[in-house]
Amino acid sequence: MTDHNYIDNIVIVGGGTAGWLSACHLAKNQPHCNITVIESPNIPTIGVGEGSVPSVAESLKALGISETDLIREAYASHKQSVEFINWKSTTQNDSKALHRYHHIFEKPACDLDELIEYWKHSGTNSSFVDVISAQGAICDNNLAPKVITMPEYKGVSGYAFHFDALRLAKLLKDHACKTFNVKHIEAELVDVTLCSDGNIGELRLDTGEGVSADLFVDCTGFKSLLLGKALCTKFIDKQDVLFTDSALTTQIHYKGHHPEEHRQSSSPYVNNNVTVASSTKATAQDAGWIWDIALSNRRGVGYVFSSKHTTAEKVETQLRDYLANDAIDDLTFRQVDFKVGYRELAWSKNCVGIGLSQGFVEPLEATGIMMIDDVAKALAAIIPRHKSSMPAAARKLNQIVSHQWASIIDFIKIHYVLSDRSESFWCDNRSQSSIPETLADRLSLWHSRLPSDYDFTSRHDVFYRINYLYILLGMDCLPNAKINNKMKVIKKMDCENTLNYIQHVRLNKEKLLHVLPSNTELLYKIKLFGLQSV
C-alpha cells in the first residue's frame, strides 16, 4: 500500500545531458524512489557546451561511467586547462605577440604567497603557471595527462573532458536504464495540470497518457516548460552584467574521418596528421570570444558574441577568418540565441529545474554541465523522505543554487573587466555600472593585496582563490607596486620548501614532456585497448 506522504516517485521531463545525468544521481542516491525520464524524440541539442571541469569527471567516476566508454562512445578527449588568447591588447598581426595564459586544473602543493613572491622577484620570463606546474607546458605541447598503463580517472595531474554532448547523453541514458533501472518514456509533453495549492498535479503526454509524481524535475531546456511556463517562476536577467547573448557555431570533422567511421571498433578516432589540443582555447574577438574544442573525431568551434555590439554577418566573417588555415570550403553555421540569467527559485512547489530550464551563463569556463552536475548532486543529497519536509529542502537548495550563480557570474565577469582591449564591447564591460557589487568589492581589495582564502567564505563559491589567481596573474594584474615592495622577498634561508618545490616542478616538467604521449596517440591506444578499470 502506497503512503502518499512520502516522496517515492520522481519524474524528470527532458532528456539530454541534464535529464540523464540527473536521473543517474537521483537513482543512485535515492534507491527507494522510482525514477522516470520523459524524453521528447524531437528536441535537438543546443551544442554550445562540450567542455567540463574536473568535478564532473569525479561524478562520472562515482556513477560508474567508464572513462574508456567516454572516449569510445562519447568521442571524449582530455581537457587540462582553458587557454585564454589575446584577452589583452597586442599586435594582432604578429602571432608571436599574442597574449596567452592558462587556467589549469592543478593547485600547487606549496604556499601560494611564497610562490608568487618567487615568481615576481626571480627575474624569470616564464609565466606563473609554468613556474608552479608542468600542466601549462603539457597543454602547450598537446600532450595527454596520462599514459595508457594508468587506471581510469588517474593522471599525472587533474583533468576533465571534452565530449560530444549528444553522445554523452546517450551513454548516460543507457547507464541510467541498465544500471539504475530508470524508466524511459518517449513522448511529447502537451499539457501541465496544476493542483489548487499550486503544485504540479499531472502531465499530459501526446500518447494520451497522464503522468503524476511526488516530485518533478524540469530538464526541458530554454523552454522551461514546468518551472518557467507552468509555475511562472521569475527569471533574473543578468544581461546587464554579461553582455553576450548569441553564439555562431560550427563543427569541423578531421580530414579523412567521417562520423560513421567511428562505429568500427578497429578504426582509430584520429590519425597522426591530427593534433588534438589539451585545452579549451578561448580567443578574444571584437565583440566576444571564440571557443575551440578538440574532440577525438572533430572540433567544435563557436563565436560567443553580444548582438548589441556587432552583427551576425561580422561574426561570421571573423569566424571564417579564424578558421582560414583549416581550408574548409563547406562550412555551415548555426546561430543560437540565449538569455543570461537564472530562475529566482531552482525549486518551486514540487518542481526542481536543472540545466537550461533553470539558468544559463555563457560557456567561458564550462559552467553549464558543471551546474547540471552540482544541482543534481545537491538535490539527490538533500531531497527529504517526507513531503512535509519539502519546503525546507527547497529553501536549502535555492540558497545553494542562488549563491552558485552569483559566484559564477562574478568569475566570468572578471575575465572581461581585466582586459584592456579598446573595442566598445570591452570598454562597456569595464563600466562600473555593469560590475556586481560583490566583484567590485573584491577588486577594490585586490588593488592593494593578493586574494586571500578569507575572501571566499562559502563552500558553494564554485571558484576560489586559486582560480582567481590564475586569471589575475595571467592578465598581469598584480597589486599596487608600492604595496608589493613591503612584501617579503623570497630568500633561500627561510623559504627552502618553496625553492625545493620549484626545483621539483622543473625536473618533473622535463620528465613528463619526455614520457607523456600526445593526445592523438593516447586516444588511439584507448580506442584499441581500453584503460585499466578503477
Image (cartoon, rainbow, N blue to C red):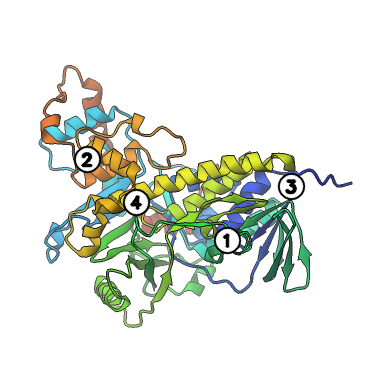
Residue at the outermost bottom position:
330
Sequence-wise, the earlier of marks 1 and 2 is 2
Which residue in the protein does label 2 denote? 128
Side (left or right) of 93 relative to 249: left
Q: Which mark is residue 412?
A: 4
Q: Amino acid at mark 3?
A: Cys
Position of residue 191 relative to residue 457, above or below, is below
Q: CA distance from mark 4 to mark 1?
A: 25 Å
Q: In this orientation, which residue lies closer to the viewer: 448 or 512?
A: 448
Sequence-wise, the earlier of marks 3 and 1 is 3
For label 4, count other residues whose C-alpha is less than 10 Å away and answer few (under 14), some (14-19) or many (20+): some
Residue at image point 60% right, 47% down: 64
User: Which quadrant would residue 120 be assigned to in this image?
Assistant: top left
Q: Amino acid at mark 4?
A: Ile
Residue at image point 82% right, 47% down: 4
Residue 461: image x %, image y %? 42, 40
Position of residue 142 relative to residue 483, above or below, is below
Q: Which mark is residue 33?
A: 3
* Image quarter of the C terminus: top right
Depth check, mark 2 against mark 4: the one in front is 4
Q: Amino acid at mark 1?
A: Gly
Depth check, mark 1 against mark 2: the one in front is 1
Q: Which mark is residue 506?
A: none
Depth check, mark 4 against mark 3: the one in front is 4
For label 1, the SS is helix
Depth check, mark 3 against mark 2: the one in front is 3
Sequence-wise, the earlier of marks 4 and 1 is 1
Residue 56: image x %, image y %? 49, 48
Residue at the outermost front position:
196
Depth check, mark 4 against mark 1: the one in front is 1
Which residue in the protein does label 1 denote? 228
Residue 231: image x %, image y %? 62, 59
